[in-house]
């Protein structure tokens, strides 16, 4: 019996939360190797391979640093390496993760200006533009945006946000949380003028939790030379110095790095464009199913739909957590819980990382059966709509 199962159940658990996601067998096998000497020539070779290939996933020619931490550590690294105590940052409260990041910024002694949203949209580029226009003294040192708000299933239009920053000729850094968008949705560090792209291992990178990433622009690197927030473990400078030869300043998470090397290979073998198209298809199939069921998508702007997570609202008076519990009990599938202001009002279908059309169909089948068992009012036929869409898509690709 696997450790996460409270009772014997046949078949693999369906882990359809929006991260941690399913870890492919190839990655599991890579992790399942003896630790090596992290000062050996062999480790240096592996380190260099990883650090050379990883930037491709971020669409950057600059460095990407890897910290042994969850995504929260990468948030902290991005802020502490680029900012000084009392600096002003402009953030958008797009959902629960933006709220947590805001909280961190305050604890670090930053002054966060928060732009509110209704949690059904991404960050508003026009509201950001208005704040930047007002800021003639350039007090705002960074614009921080959560690209895919994993709690709401809404995507912020980062390229447009860069556009308004350029139009305002504002020198603030653009810091983007791509924790649940990297390798699922287009996120182009260089082309979009992002200064720090933050991500983590446990989402579309198909690894267990435990590694986090900062892709760093030249401007961000220059800012790190004068930034005064205290930092030690997360200091970019010492990390970059060691990384030059493929090593790390402290004992690296060797097992996870074996897995990261393999996951990067898998993504590059499939081709990043194909990976993104696959996620796009999953998002569309989910939305088609939801439309037939009559469940409301929490994201209300079609430009901001996520390809990695779909957040669906249950009809008023019907507990989303009860639905999740029924599905877990009867069909051995985990779905994401509603967070923050949509707790128990919504559930989240994770469709990121190592999955295919049939995984998604199984997931949607579990949701449709679960709704029938939990007495959530819906119109049957959502799974059929997804099947029709996926089959049509496969036919067109043939
Ligand atoms: N940002 C986003 C968008 C997330 O989805 C998450 C986690 O789900 C985090 C930040 C926090 O990352 P972690 O829980 O790995 O520390």
Image: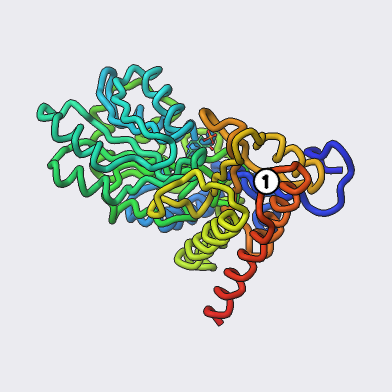
- Residue 354 position within the rendered picture, expressed as x and y whole percent measured from the top left: 62, 57
Here the colouring is: rainbow
Left or right: where 372 falls relative to 172: right
Residue 208 vertical position relative to residue 264 in the rendered view, above or below: above
Tell which of 379 and 347 is nearer to you.
379
What residue is at 12 percent from the left and 42 percent from the top?
Answer: 169
- Nearer the observer, 159 or 129: 129
Q: Is residue 37 visible?
A: no
Where's residue 381, x and y in %? 67, 61
Res. 386 visible in picture: yes
Query: Residue at left 50%, top 50%?
Result: 47
Left or right of 129 in this view: 117: right
Q: Quadrant of the C terminus?
A: bottom right
At x 72% / y 35%, what residue is drawn? 322
Q: Is residue 398 above or below residue 67?
A: below
Q: Secondary structure at mark 1?
A: loop
Answer yes or no: disc 1 within 8 Å of ligand 1: no
Query: Dividing the picture into quarters, in which one does residue 318 lie?
Result: top right
Measuring 41% from the left and 58% from the top, which residue is drawn there? 56
Q: Position of residue 191 (x, y in %)?
A: 28, 56
Mark 1 sits on what residue? 377
Mark 1 Cα-neighbour bin, 10 Å: few <14, some 14–19, many ≥20: some
Residue 8, position as x, y percentages in the image: 89, 44
Considering depth in this image, is 29 or 372 the residue closer to the camera?
Answer: 372
């Amino acid at each position: 019996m696997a450790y996460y199962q409270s009772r014997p159940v046949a078949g693999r658990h369906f882990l359809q939360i929006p991260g941690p996601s399913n870890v492919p067998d190839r990655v599991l096998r890579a992790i399942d190797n003896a630790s090596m000497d992290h000062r050996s020539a062999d480790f240096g070779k592996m380190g260099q391979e990883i650090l050379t290939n990883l930037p491709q996933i971020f669409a950057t020619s600059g460095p990407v640093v890897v910290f042994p931490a969850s995504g929260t550590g990468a948030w902290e690294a991005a802020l502490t390496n680029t900012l000084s105590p009392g600096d002003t940052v402009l953030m958008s409260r797009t959902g629960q993760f933006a709220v947590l990041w805001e909280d961190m910024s305050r604890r670090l002694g930053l002054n966060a200006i928060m732009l509110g949203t209704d949690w059904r949209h991404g960050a508003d580029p026009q509201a950001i533009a208005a704040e930047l226009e007002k800021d003639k003294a350039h007090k705002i040192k960074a614009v921080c945006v959560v690209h895919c708000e994993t709690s709401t299933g809404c995507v912020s239009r980062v390229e447009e946000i860069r556009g308004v920053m350029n139009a305002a000729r504002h020198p603030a850094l653009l810091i983007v949380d791509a924790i649940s968008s990297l390798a699922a949705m287009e996120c182009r560090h260089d082309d979009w003028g992002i200064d720090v792209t933050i991500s983590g291992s446990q989402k579309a990178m198909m690894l267990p939790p435990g590694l986090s990433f900062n892709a760093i622009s030249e401007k961000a690197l220059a800012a790190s030379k004068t930034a005064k927030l205290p930092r030690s473990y997360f200091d970019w400078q010492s990390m970059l110095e060691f990384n030059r030869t493929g090593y790390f300043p402290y004992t690296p998470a060797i097992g996870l790095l074996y897995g990261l090397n393999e996951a990067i290979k898998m993504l590059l073998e499939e081709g990043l464009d194909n990976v993104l198209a696959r996620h796009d298809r999953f998002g569309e199939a989910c939305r088609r199913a939801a439309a037939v069921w009559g469940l409301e998508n929490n994201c209300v702007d079609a430009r901001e739909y996520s390809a990695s997570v779909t957040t669906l609202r249950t009809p008023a008076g019907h507990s989303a957590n009860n639905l999740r519990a029924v599905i877990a009990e009867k069909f051995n599938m985990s779905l994401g819980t509603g967070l923050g202001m949509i707790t128990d009002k919504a559930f989240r279908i994770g469709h990121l990382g190592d999955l295919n059309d049939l995984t998604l169909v199984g997931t949607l089948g579990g949701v449709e059966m679960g709704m029938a068992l939990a007495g959530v009012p819906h119109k049957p036929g959502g799974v059929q709509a997804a099947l029709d869409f996926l089959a049509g898509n496969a036919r067109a690709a043939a």
